[in-house]
Every structure is written in C-alpha cells, then in structure tokens.
Image: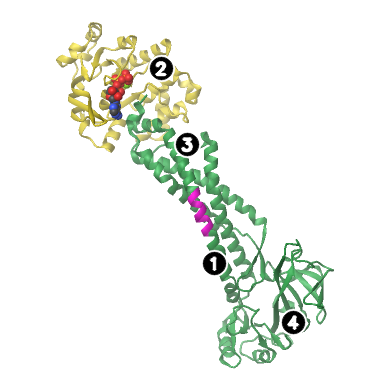
Amino acid sequence: MSEEATSAETSKASAKASDTTTAKRSPIIVCRKIVRSFWRAKERLDVLDELDLEIAEGSFEALMGPSGSGKTTLLNLIAGLDRPTSGTLTVAGTEVSAMGDAALARWRSQTIGFVFQHFNLIPVLTALENVELPLLLTSLGSSERKKRAQIALRVVGLEDRMHHRPQQLSGGQEQRVGIARAIVHDPKIIVADEPTGELDRKSADEVLHLLERLNKEFDKTILMVTHDPAAAERATVLRKLDKGKLL
Amino acid sequence: MVPIRYNVRNLLVRRTTTMAAALGVGLVVFVLAASLMLNEGLARTLDQSGSADTAIVLRKGSDSEMPSSVEDKAISLIKVAPGVKSSSDGQPLVLGEVVVVLFQDLANGKGKSNATLRGMPLDRVQVFRPEVKIIEGRMAAPGTDEVVVGARVVGRFKGFEIGQSLDLRKARPVKVVGIFEANGSSFESEVWGDIEYVRSAFGREAVVSSVRVKLESPAVFDGFEVAVERDKQLGLEVLAEPDFYRKQSENTSIFIIAMGTLIAVFFSIGAMIGAMITMYGSVAHRKREIGVLRALGFSRSAIMFSFLLESVLLALLGASLGTLASLGMGLVKFSMLNFTTFSEITFQFTATPEIILRSIIFGGVMGVLGGFLPAIRAARTAPIEAMKG
Ligand SMILES: Nc1ncnc2c1ncn2[C@@H]1O[C@H](COP(=O)(O)OP(=O)(O)OP(=O)(O)O)[C@@H](O)[C@H]1O
Ligand SMILES: [Mg+2]
C-alpha cells in the first residue's frame, strides 16, 4: 500500500484492517496525478488536483469530506462514468482513462456494481426485473438470468418481494434491491455514493451490514462515499478528501 | 437490449399523454385508411360493372356514354361484324342504350344532384346483365313510362321510391315500379327505363349513347375492334367493358387518393410533432433513469433503440385505433360525383388486408420520424446523470 493511503487511515480502521489480509493485497484501483477540471463562466475549477490514490483489492473503504470536496467526482472517475482531464487511472487492470465511450460502457457492465443514494430503481420494473438488468448485457439465457437475480435478492433477504414495484417497497428495502442489482453480475468493485443518505438508522444499519458481508464473504472491493460517521466506522479504511486533495 | 416491457409500462404509466399523442397519429391513419378504402370501394364498384367478353362501342373521342352518340344505322353494321355472339334464336347480341343525366332534387331537401338515367330495351336486360335482380316490386314493362331504380339511390333522390313518380322533363313523368340490385356494380346508382320513352323525352330519336356487344369470347375482341374502327366514316371507338369502367374511375380515383394523401401528410406533420413532444417530455422526465441504464452499461445505441421503439409502439397504438375506426366506415355508404360522367355514383369504404397493413406501416413510420430526435437526446444522456442529486 502507498504511504499516503496508509496515513489516511484512521487508527480504528487500520486496527480493523490488520486482522484481515486485505491490506496486504495488490491495488485494484490506482490513480496517478488525477486532475478533473470543470469550466464555469470561463473560470477553470480543478475539482480534483493531481490526486494519487491506491485501493487494495478486497478492501472496504469509506471516503468522507465536506460537501463540494470532490467525492462524487472521484467516484465517477473510478467507476468509469467520467474521464479525468489528465492523469492515469487504472482499475481492475484496465487503464480506464484511455478508453472510448462504448468500451467504457462494456467495461462498467462487467466490473462495477453501483449503489446509489437515491436507490435509482426503475419505477416501472419489479424488484426482480430491476436486479436482472445488468444480466441483460451478458450472454446468459432468460431462465439463468432469473435464477441469478433471485439468488441476489435472497442474499439481501428480499426474495419474497421480487414481484413488487419500487413504490411498494420501503426505502431500506429499495436500497437492498439496489444492492442486489449491484452484485448480480458479480463485479469486482462496488461503488456506493452515500448509500445510507436517505435511510433511517435501522435501515442504514441493515444496508451497512450487507455491504460488510459482501466485502467479507464475497470479497468485493467496496468504495463508499458517506457523511455518516457510523457508516464510515464499518469500513476497513477511511479516507478524507478536502478541496480535491486527500488528507 | 433494454426490455420492451420497460417501454410498454412507461407508456401505460403516462396514460393520458400517451393516449393524446396516439390519437393524433390515429387521426392521420384514419384519414389515410379511409381514403384508400374509398378508392378501393370505387374500383370494386366499377370493376363489378364490366365483363371481359363484352365490348362497348362509343363515338370516337367520348370518354363516357353520356356525350357519345351512335346512330341506329351504325348498329346494323355492328351486328354483322366478326366475333359477335348470337342468341339461340339467331339474333346477334347487340344492345343499344341511351344514357342521360337527370338533375334531381335530393330527398333530404339539401339541393339537387345528378343521377344517371339509362334507356334500354327492357326485355333484354337479363341477356346482357344476368346479375340484375329485382329485389322489390317488378321490372318496368317495355314500351311504357315505367322505370326501375337502383338499390343504392333509393331514398336518396325525391321520388325514387316504389309507387312514386318523377319528372324526367317537364310533362314527362315516369312511375317507379321496382328496385333492382346488380351485384354491387355502378348500375345500382342508375335509373332504368324504356329506350323509346327516354329517347322521345329527350329528343334523341334514332340515336343511342353506347352499344354493348356480346362477343363469342374475349379472344375475338381484337378482330371485332379492327372491323368496327376501320370505317372512319362511322367514327366509332371500341373498348372492352372492364377497360371502359377502369377509365371511368381514373379521375375520381386520382382525386380521392390525392385528397387523402394531402390531408394525411398535412395532419401527419402535426401528429409527428405531437409524438415528438411526448417523447421529449418522456426523455426529460426519465433523465436520471436513462443515466442509470447508461451507468449499468447499456450502450448509447441500446438507449436510442429503446426510445425509438417506444415512439413506434405509441404510433402503432394510434395507428391501430385509426385503422379500427376506418373499418367502422365500412358500414357507411358514400356518394360522390364521378368526374368523368358527372353523375353520382354510390359506393362503400372497402377494406383490404393490404390497406390495413399500409395504414399501420404509415403510422409506424410516423413513430420513427417523430421519435428520432428525442431518441437521440436520450442516447446522449451522460451516465453521470445517475449520480446527480
Ligand atoms: N459537471 C460539473 N460541472 C461543473 N462543476 C461541477 C460538475 N460536477 C461537479 N462540479 C463541481 O465540483 C465540485 C465537487 O462536486 P462533487 O459532486 O464531487 O462534490 P461532493 O464531494 O460529492 O459533494 P456532496 O457531499 O455535496 O455530494 C463542486 O463544486 C461541484 O459544483
Ligand atoms: Mg456527492
């Protein structure tokens, strides 16, 4: 692990990390001198400023920082939703900063699972159909897709709600369906932007517990942006971002 | 591929907007289908009227029977031309008829219109038009002032009912004694009376409008035509009956199709804009959703296709409603002026599988065109939309 990464860990998270083997594994996400700028009224705004970052495979990292510090921007880059203005970004062995649009879309569909703050389930589709969506981009047949979507729903404990529409579910349940959708295609990395931001304490804890399980039992690398200290505590590594730089 | 049920359900969720846009498309398809059906009805009506082994002789240069005149003495020459069929008693099957226009009051009191009056040897109707059936009353008697009325104009003009009488001209009344059907042909829009009575009423003694000739077979037509047209003094023109009726409908058919297409194209611009606005609304409303699909890895082309498909589904829904409504028109009788004969002809909207298919495809194409720009906008949605608050 890089020096900066280690220094960014809190003592508590590092204690947690030390009793697993994750910290010693090779990095799955490597950012080198990442810059992401936006232009606003002819004024250049460097949201991320020559940022270096390594994230080890199998770790569960939390990213905190004040509003506007660039957390979502960084997450978008790592997840291949956006491209850096300069710098190189290698994720799961692929240099995503150099990829074209279509290739990037295909890469996302195989590598990344998304958990969104607003759940972002498709309202007209049932829980099962929502979870099945990422599998439509694979070569799996319909019955195999259904089977896998059901298994994913079972993992999040919502198999009995599979024919419900998002409207018919509570916020916590919606987010658990979101998690099922994020894992159904077995991606290496899960990115979550404030996954508990809209949930009450109890639902938030359920979601966090699930993420922990995905990390421990299924060896998913998880990168989670959060404002919630209790959520951050569940992670093995805690990083802090301020004004486009990691502290 | 984004699943089709995604599109279907989104259309259902936005029921009112969907319906409004679909009805716009439906209206256009209705107009188009109705005009095609009308044209088909016209073609059928006139097609029924001709048989291939019958030749019709007119004065050269007359498009129709009305302006044509053939002298009685020419008829005797036609009778001896090659290929003319004879009846069992050795009589050549040649029929001279006089056709005039009646300018009659409409029964509904809304002005006047033209009806066709045909004077003929009434005892020979069955020989040339075996399909003719008296459905009410009886056949008019030869040599009298009686007439029979075609089933399609009964009740349309004043006096066109059994037992009533009408004036052909001043002081030339005729009595309606029967109603006939002729297999749906244009004869059903005519009034038939005795040839001599009609000729004297209109001062056309010793001339007829047209001469119908039964030929031994359709194959002898060419020989017959050459023989009759050879004598330039007579100045006659020979046509096979089916060709004659096709010619009769040409102008009217062009008019119907041109009007229908013009109206459909004109309206379709509005309907496509309607579909486009609906789809733009849909894209704007689902911006984040589209971002999510893009984030999950669906390609731009998959999104583009999905929205195009949604627009086509919307249009097809409208097209089906429009076509269905046009089928309802099949129950309606339609009267219009035949532009060649300038008399009224009554016919029905007639649907064929081809017309239905064409109309629905036309609707589908409107969906593609109207949905194109919104689908491009949808495809351009950035995947980071999924992450925005
Ligand atoms: N597309 C964009 N165009 C212009 N500016 C942008 C764009 N995206 C982000 N920014 C700016 O970049 C900065 C960082 O935004 P970002 O969304 O990454 O913050 P954040 O740390 O996730 O904040 P929050 O905790 O509120 O979600 C903000 O000042 C924001 O206005
Ligand atoms: Mg954010």
Q: CA distance from mark 2 to mark 1?
A: 66 Å
**Same chain assignment for discs 1 and 3:** yes
Q: Is residue A231 magenta?
A: no
What color does chain B have in the rendering?
Answer: green
Which residue is at the front of the view, B384 or A243? A243
| Residue contact between numbered discs 1 and 4, judged by CB atoms under 8 Å | no
From which residue to which does the magenta span run? B261-270
The kind of residue tagged 3 is Arg
| Image quarter hosting the N terminus of chain B | top left
**Is B62 drawn above or below residue B308 in the view shown?**
below
Q: CA distance from mark 3 to mark 2?
A: 29 Å
Residue A41: % across, % down: 27, 31
Tag 1 secondary structure: helix
- The numbered dot on residue B202 is 4
> Is the CB of the residue bearing disc 3 within 8 angstroms of ligand 2?
no
**Same chain assignment for discs 2 and 1:** no
Residue B260, visible in the rendered structure: yes
Tag 2 secondary structure: loop
Identify the main secondary structure in magenta.
Answer: helix
The subunit carrying tag 4 is B
Which residue is at the front of the view, B54 or B41? B41
Q: Quadrant of residue A213?
A: top left
The mark lying in front, picked from 3 and 2, is 2
Q: Quadrant of ligand 1?
A: top left
The subunit carrying tag 1 is B
Q: CA distance from mark 1 to mark 4?
A: 33 Å
The answer to which of marks 1 and 4 sits earlier in the sequence is 4
What color does chain A have in the rendering?
Answer: yellow
The kind of residue tagged 1 is Ile
- The numbered dot on residue B352 is none
Q: Which residue is mark 2?
A: A198
The kind of residue tagged 4 is Phe
